[in-house]
Amino acid sequence: MALFASSTQQVPPAVAVPRHVAIIMDGNGRWARKRFMPRFSGHARGVEMVRETVRSCLERGVEFLTLFAFSSENWRRPPEEVSLLMQLFVKALEQEVDKLDRNGVRLRIIGDLSRFEKRLQDLIFAAEARTAGNTRLQLTIAANYGGRWDIMQAVNTMLRAQLGKQSGWTEADLEPFLAMSFAPEPDLFIRTGGEERISNFLLWQLAYTELYFTGTLWPEFARAEFDLALASFQKRERRFGRTSAQLVGNESNA
């Protein structure tokens, strides 16, 4: 059984601050190129912005933060860049877990981890175990993740778990096996860098998520930019299939 209800099955409660924010952190390479720096410098600067965004979420009461760090399609990038990204991932895990733990942040990594080297896998499992008891913020990093992969692995796992069932499947059957089954669906999706697509990220979970696109490159997405995204969210009318008149009626009866 899923921990949180699907937005297509049950209307989530209205919130002023998004409970769950999901971000595609785009623009590291362009940020570096504008400064005549190697692309890796942009990725390193991007890690600093992750720290700042975690702090912003802690201060503003966001409970879940999910970041798209490396997609299943990013293996198509030049091998030297992929290698440097893996090294940066290792370095970040080695240096950041203590800070996350001290600040009450639980770290999870979702995606197909089998393609990563054993050292990186061991660091991931150790970081998850160390922070497992923390509750202030759940930080999820999607690495070698794709939305279609997520749905397919959930379907296959569901079928193996219920070998005797041949038909009559529902969302409730599938949701416990999705990679993000431990979190509510994102309230707010942010993509930096100017592109306006979701790029195979959380395809199932973003059904009723509010989308926010900004031309600001990720290494420049400071607290003021994050607050602009929150302000945009607060202006949205979240109907979940209902009419505006129904929302007004619910507010007057509250």
Image: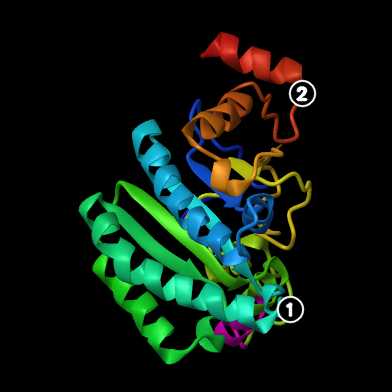
- In the picture of the structure, the residue carrying the numbered disc 2 is 243
Question: In the rendered structure, which segment of residues is drawn in magenta?
Answer: 155-163
Q: Residue lying furthest top in this view?
A: 252
102 horizontally vs 45: left or right: left
Which quadrant would residue 33 be assigned to in this image?
Answer: bottom right
| Amino acid type indicated by mark 1 | Arg
- In the picture of the structure, the residue carrying the numbered disc 1 is 76
Q: Residue 112: where, in percent of width, then height?
A: 57, 80
Q: Is 109 above or below relative to 253?
A: below
Which quadrant would residue 153 be assigned to in this image?
Answer: bottom right
Residue at 61% across / 71% down in the picture? Answer: 145
Q: Is residue 162 magenta?
A: yes
Q: Which mark is residue 187?
A: none
Which residue is at the front of the view, 49 or 248? 49
Q: Residue 80: where, in percent of width, then height?
A: 62, 81
Residue at 51% across / 85% down in the picture? Answer: 116
| Amino acid type indicated by mark 2 | Thr
> CA gap, disc 1 to disc 2?
44 Å
Please identify the dominant SS of the magenta region. helix
Q: Secondary structure at mark 2?
A: loop
Residue at 48% across / 89% down in the picture? Answer: 117
Which residue is at the front of the view, 85 or 65? 85
Which quadrant would residue 7 be assigned to in this image?
Answer: top right
Q: Residue lying furthest left in this view?
A: 102
Q: Secondary structure at mark 1?
A: helix
Residue at 32% across / 61% down in the picture? Answer: 96
Q: Residue 227: where, in percent of width, then height?
A: 52, 29
Which residue is at the front of the view, 254 or 52? 52
Q: Return the disc, 1 or 2, that comes first in the chain's sequence.
A: 1
